[in-house]
Amino acid sequence: MRTRGANQPRAFHFPVCCGIVLTLLAASAGPARGGTINFDVNAESNTLTAPRLFSNATHLSEIYASWGVHFAGPAGNDGGAILVDISTNNGGWGGWARSSPNVLAFTAPSSPRDLSDGGHASGPETIRFDSAMKTVTLWATGDNANTTFELAAFDGNGIALDSDTESITVRNWVSLSVSSDAGIRSVVFTLKATDNPWTGYLVDDLSYTPDLLHASPRTRDVHVAGPCDNGVAGAATGEQA
């Protein structure tokens, strides 16, 4: 008996009636894929030239939509904005990026800055995924403050799956990571506490690993081939990835 390799397509054959287009459900995962967003390039891998000031920036939303990742603030045009960090020659806002030159920046809770699109660079920040994820990790810093952050994970129905709360001292970065076998479809990043409400905070290096078990299935249309006169059945042939 011939054994099919792990990556070898499997053919299937079955009788069908003429004129029917069949929609087949593939057993393999849909568009699930992992990756890292460092806010230095866009989804086309082109360099992002970020502004120095919140007043010249807009809230991050759909720049990475083609990667299946979507960002949103608490309401409307609010949310984190991509800014260049202060380590560059031109200088920027806030602290140093973990992976220079850009960061996802948020303003101080006591003095939210206006963005050019009319929103405020404030959290919490929600990150949604088109496909289920197994693990999501990001790095955060409180810039000039001792801070506590929370990263919470949810499934597609908004049910809490996991959370991670970490505290960090001034000018240091901390990793927050959540994981679940139930399939993470969104995470919410929140500033929980700070000893300096007049300073902002930063996020960098978001990474995510797909959960293939709970990935969205994909469908494929298969057209009937062969003669079908007088109700004679033809044969439909396709491949399952």
Image (spheres, rainbow, N blue to C red):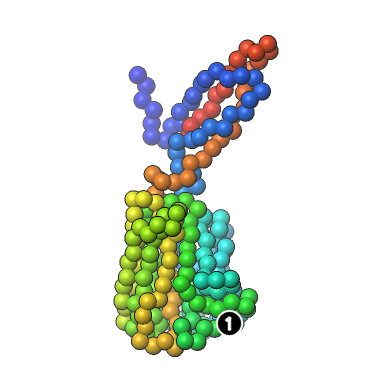
Vertical relation: 31 (above or below) 204: above
- Count the labels in the image: 1
Location of residue 109 in the rendering, given as x and y in whole percent from the top left corner: 46, 83
Image check: 119 left or right of 100? right
Residue 97, image quadrant: bottom left
The residue sitting at 38% across, 44% down in the picture is 213
Instruction: For mark 1, give the secondary structure.
Output: loop
Location of residue 148 in the rendering, given as x and y in whole percent from the top left corner: 34, 77
The residue sitting at 50% across, 53% down in the picture is 130
Vertical relation: 138 (above or below) 180: below
Image check: 219 left or right of 95? right
Location of residue 180 in the rendering, given as x and y in whole percent from the top left corner: 34, 54
Residue 53, image quadrant: bottom right
Location of residue 66 in the rendering, given as x and y in whole percent from the top left corner: 56, 55
Residue at far right of view: 229
Vertical relation: 154 (above or below) 90: above
The residue sitting at 40% across, 82% down in the picture is 143
The quadrant of the picture occupied by the N terminus is top left
Which amino acid lies under the numbered mark 1 shown in the image of this protein? Asp
Is residue 168 in sight in this rendering? yes
Image check: 181 left or right of 9? left
The residue sitting at 42% across, 55% down in the picture is 155
Q: Nearer the viewer, residue 112 or 7?
A: 112
| Residue labelled with disc 1 | 114
Image check: 88 left or right of 176? right
